[in-house]
Image (spheres, rainbow, N blue to C red):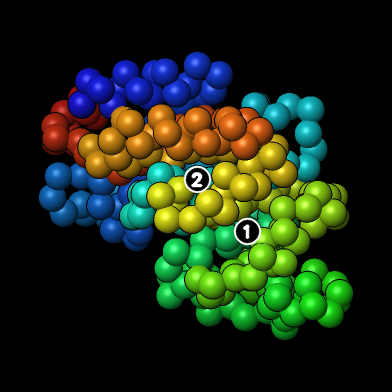
């Protein structure tokens, strides 16, 4: 464990480290054993704190874009992206676009039940408005854009989403763009667009992600011209009972 903490310390030389007690899914399985709902960490509170870190790191930008990136599968990146987007839209009353870039597991896309009028492939081929490739979540100010609904994409599609001409109109329209990207060990999509967003939040799973892997991901972000805003240390386990924490 000391190696992990040393690695995170080195990784945050130019970044803020965010260490919320985030779970993965509704059960918040980040403790040793089952967690009752009353004892579950306040996900919404953690997401508001994460949003404040983003705004504090990018004080000169009114319209911000961030990419959430993990090194390996099951680190909870998609859960954090979805909950951050939902919270900022609902509680902060901001116009938010959640870009689903994760093609590692198409069956687990965030808001998979929402289907846009056109796929991004059709937008590239026909030149129609990119608005047709996004969906509004009910009557909220949250929109979702599933970029790659399949694992196989064409080089023309990849090139299209790497262009500044794709991102700039979206940034003008939305207060916050959140990009949920696939794990670095599976696909290079995230590091390939880090220079197109304002900052990157690196997701690290406690007690699972090796420090060498986390450092390698950090280096890929920097090599791609990305700016690391912080690290989410996800799925931490609390081995001391909650009532002891509350007494301290």
Report the side of 91 relative to 231 (left or right). Answer: right
Classed neighbour count for the residue bearing mark 1: other residues with Cα under 10 Å, few (<14), some (14–19), many (≥20): many
Decide which of 207, 28 is in the foreground and name it.
Answer: 207
Kindly report which numbered mark, 1 or 2, lies closer to the viewer in this rendering. Answer: 2
Mark 2: which secondary structure? strand
Between discs 1 and 2, the one toward the N terminus: 2
Point out residue 9 in the picture as x, y percentages from the top left corner: 39, 18
Q: Disc 1 designates what residue?
A: 98
Viewer can see residue 54 = no
Q: CA distance from mark 1 to mark 2?
A: 14 Å
In this view, which residue lies farthest toward the front? 155
For residue 227, the mark is none
The residue sitting at 20% across, 26% down in the picture is 1
Q: Disc 2 designates what residue?
A: 69
Disc 1 to disc 2: CB gap under 8 Å? no
Point out residue 132 in the picture as x, y percentages from the top left corner: 77, 76
């Amino acid at each position: 464990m000391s190696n992990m903490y040393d690695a995170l310390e080195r990784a945050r030389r130019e970044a803020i480290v965010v260490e919320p007690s985030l779970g993965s899914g509704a059960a918040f399985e980040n403790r040793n054993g089952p967690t009752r709902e009353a004892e579950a960490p306040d996900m919404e509170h953690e997401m508001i704190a994460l949003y404040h870190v983003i705004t504090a790191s990018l004080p000169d930008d009114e319209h911000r874009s961030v990419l959430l990136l993990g090194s390996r599968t099951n680190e909870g990146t998609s859960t954090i992206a979805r909950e951050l987007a939902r919270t900022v839209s609902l509680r902060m009353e901001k116009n938010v676009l959640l870009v689903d870039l994760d093609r590692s597991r198409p069956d687990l896309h965030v808001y998979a039940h929402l289907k846009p009028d056109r796929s991004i492939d059709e937008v590239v081929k026909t030149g129609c408005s990119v608005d047709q490739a996004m969906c509004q979540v009910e009557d909220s100010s949250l929109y979702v854009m599933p970029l790659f609904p399949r694992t196989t994409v064409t080089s023309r599609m990849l090139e299209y989403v790497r262009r500044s001409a794709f991102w700039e109109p979206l940034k003008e329209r939305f207060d916050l763009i959140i990009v949920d990207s696939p794990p670095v060990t599976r696909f290079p999509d995230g590091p390939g667009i880090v220079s197109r967003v304002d900052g990157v939040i690196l997701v690290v799973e406690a007690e699972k992600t090796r420090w060498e892997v986390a450092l390698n991901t950090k280096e890929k972000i920097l090599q791609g011209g990305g700016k690391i805003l912080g690290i989410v240390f996800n799925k931490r386990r609390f081995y001391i009972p909650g009532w002891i924490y509350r007494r301290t």
